[in-house]
Image: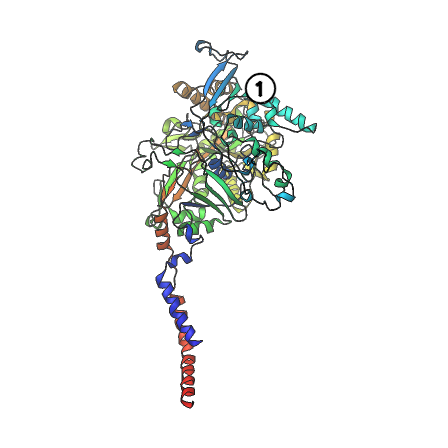
Amino acid sequence: MPRFSVVLFWIVIALLTGCDISAINSPYPAAESEKTVSYSSFMLRPKHLDPARSYSANESLITAQIYEPPFQYHYLKRPYQMEPLTAAKMPEVEFLDKNQQVLAGSQQTAENIAFSRYTITLRPGIAYQPHPAFAQDASGQWLYHDLDEQNSNHLNTIMAFPEQATRELKAADYVYQIKRLAHPEVHSPILGLMSEHIVGLGDFAATLNKLQQQGKPLDLRELHIDGVEVIDDYQYQITVYGQYPQLKYWLAMPFFAPIPWEADVFYQQTVLKDKNITLDWYPIGTGAYQMVENDPNRRMVMIKNPNYHGEIYPSEGNPGDAAAGLLDDAGLPMPFIDKIIYTLEKESTSYWGKFIQGYYDISGLTSDSFEQAIQVSSGGSFGLSEDMMEKGIDLQAAVGTTTHYIGFNMLDSVVGGDSERARKLRQAIAIAIDQEEFVSIFFNGRGIPAQGPIPPGIFGYREGREGLDPYVYEWRNDAVRTRPISFAKELLADAGYPNGRDAETGQPLVLYFDVSAVGPDAKAQLDWMRKQFQKLNIQLVIRSTDYNRFQDKMRRGQTQIFKVGWSADYPDPENFLFLLYGPNAKAIHNGENSANYQNPEFDKLFEQMRVMPDGDERQQIIDKMVDIVRHDVPWVWGFHPKQLTLFHAWNKNIKPNLMANNTLKYHRIDPLLRDQLRSKWNQPTIWPLILLLFIFSLAMLPAVLMYRRKKHQQAVNS
């Protein structure tokens, strides 16, 4: 036994000094260290992966890699440009009269155009990922379309099916998905909006509802939408009412990605639904990746689609892209990454710690990690801390195509309406709420004050002096500055509330602020908001509710002042200005105009602007619209957040793209550099172990000596 302990000691020492001991710290199998695997995490599992239902940012991280609509955004070019994905070319658009006859060029006026018809042509030879829904036996019978409990007991995940097959993408698959938007069991969030534009979609939804109520089966292949038609295997058409040029942007979103009827039938089987083998859990597409593991308590895994039709990395970009190394892979086939692993992390601190160790490739920033990672200059610009620079970490920053704003319910008797009294009250409040301070305190300076409804990066946005809101801001010391609070108090007095009291009754002005916010962080922000109103001696009553109750109050028009936000669905000013379009008033028409703002001049200009191409004429109309809403102040414009992302040095081809979500196929990883840096950063501290073994050996030494003495004595005696 003593001899064994000594031998064990020297074996352990030899192993520790002769192998890569950094692997002791790694949470991943050693076999993955040199593979092109992307490591990231999720805190809340996606709720919907069905492209007809999915509409959340965390879901798009998955769906955009798997599903392929006909068009996409160019990865590198700015402003954002669309390009074909599965389509052979951009859509052909024809303008039709009320009899659906094609109009000649000279006849294409707003009065004559009753419909617009989009023809989409697909590239042949594109195949779906391997999937059991396509599997057939030798006689052509479906292997897995008629499952029961007995023959499906062992099938608990999509990868458990022994037979997987594929087929070619067809135009009918895109049409089938548009029909699914209207299915009563799908509950697509864009059905209402699309029914306003796609000819016959609303009627089609009503037909499906009627058939379901009658207990009849819904075979979407046998039912027809007036405005959606399959021409042949590689062409289909969508007809919209009037002009709706924004349709092309929707055709770059997963809502309009293809779904094969075989997969829909496959997933409708009760025995599979009971096991949560559904389209919401296991998507199917033609994209660069396919999902092979979805465990919400552990991880989600995607691998390269073996049937992927292939794309090549772009050879063109913006000025500076080549110097930044963003064109080094020009012309090479994509995707570059073989496997994508999202691991559950319940705490942001845990994620940050693993990112610093190199076990996650990319990281956003929270308030906890901001000070460790970022240095803010006196001019307010962001830079990396010395610790981050020493690790070779790169920082990418972009102002989001998002706006956070405070709205006034224009139907309210105090803050609403178009009277001069109410308008000046709204202007005074807009000045009092210090957006710069809010962004500095609660977002670490990661945002810029908004000057109107349109964020940077969207056509129509104006920068600098020509872009400021003159009712709330002024140009002072060569910069945009908020007007002084004394000016706001004068406006408040002109509105009939001197020193925050009603001039007629003498009663203090009490206003109500509705939010869907809970928790300590929300309390700090709400306390700050009260202080902003106190500058004007206005008493602010906070009415905080859960999200569902808040939305119900918004729909009923029962709010007075509220806080919401909006992120661009597509890079067009229409997607922001429609939030103030009268016919979209939430309490009246159940639209997205949460302020219930109505201005006939604005509405008329909106209808003109929405169908125009980008150019000087459209910009002039947008300028007029923005001037109108700045004067009327239906919103306190709020701010546009800045997105800061950190990347380790082994990440290549990284350029923020705020419109596209299918960007993982462009990314490349240098696994050898990652393995080297991980080893360097994660050397275990082994001297305590060596010391412990040495002490153990010393402790065993008397026993060894005694043992040897006994053996010697026994030898002498014998």
Find residue 139 and report its horizontal and vertical position in percent. 57, 34
Residue at horizontal 66%, vertical 29%?
Answer: 217
Q: Position of residue 40 (x, y in %)?
A: 45, 45
Can residue 675 be seen at all in this image of the molecule? yes
Q: Is residue 291 above or below residue 429?
A: below
- Colour scheme of the picture: rainbow
Residue extending furthest front?
Answer: 138
Q: Which quadrant would the N terminus be assigned to in this image?
A: bottom left
Q: Is residue 543 above or below residue 471?
A: below
In the picture, the quarter occupied by the C terminus is: bottom left
Residue 270 place in picture, x, y as percent:
64, 39
Residue type, label 1: Asp
Q: Is residue 152 above or below residue 453?
A: below
Considering depth in this image, is 401 or 41 the residue closer to the camera?
41
Q: Residue 632, image x and y in percent?
A: 50, 25
Is the residue marked by circle 1 packed among few (<14), some (14-19), or many (20+) residues within 10 Å?
few
User: Exactly how many numbered labels are in the figure?
Assistant: 1
